[in-house]
Image (spheres, rainbow, N blue to C red):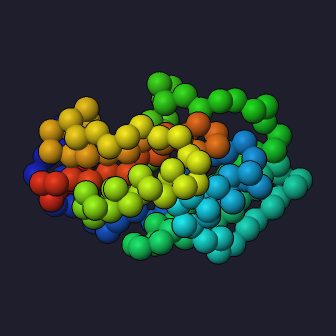
Amino acid sequence: MVTAERTALMPTLTGVHHVALTVTDVERSVPWYERVLGFTTVGRRDDGAGGLREVFLRGPGAGLALTLVQHTDVKRASFNERRPGLAHLSFAVPDEAGLRQWTERLTECGVLFAPVDDGGTAKGRSVIALRDPDGIQLVLWVDSRGCGA
């Protein structure tokens, strides 16, 4: 149990530095994140001997840092949000108009998605759910009440 005294001693977390997603093929995933979601590649690291490839991306708007990681020495496995680990990654959208713009963009890009849902997730919130090339669930999220998830 966390006591008030213990909480007072806790260092401050100031935000999320980056999110790293494991993908099966960075050369397939990077263009998708750039084309569909507007990310920009800002760096790469390829450790061929260690079986690790990483591509560092920066998102539009608030500029979320996203790292796509490929373990070249591991057998491919499909994403499953029911296993321990990542369930989904949500991106904030400012308002309902923005969510409609995303609906149009995803349609133009040929990306399959679940249409705007204003009640299935939580009352007062609207979301669009989609999947990246590896099946990782991504959510575009509007909270009409002005508070977080």
| Place of residue 52 in the rendered image (x, y in percent of width and height, measured from the top left) | 77, 52
Q: Quadrant of the N terminus?
A: top left
Give me the residue at 81% from left, 61% from top. Answer: 46
Front one among 21 and 122:
122
Horizontally, residue 142 falls left or right of residue 29, namely: left
Up the image or down, 133 lies above or below 53; here it is above
Say whether residue 99 is visible: yes
Let me know if residue 19 appears in the view: no
Query: In the shown orientation, is residue 49 left or right of residue 99?
Result: right
Count the marks.
0
Query: Which residue is located at x 28 percent, y 61 percent?
Result: 97
Out of 83 and 125, give the one closest to the viewer. 125
- Give the residue at x 41% y 52%: 103
Q: Position of residue 107 (x, y in %)?
A: 51, 50
Horizontal and vertical percent for residue 75? Answer: 79, 31
Residue 18 in the figure: left or right of residue 52: left
How far across and down, in percent of the image, does residue 77 sit? 69, 29
**Residue found farthest to the top:** 82
Outermost residue on the right side: it is 49
Residue at 69%, 60% in the rendered image: 31
Relative to the observer, which residue lies in front, 68 or 40? 40
Compare residues 136 and 67 and report the one nearer the observer: 136
Q: Which of the 4 image quadrants contains residue 39?
A: bottom right
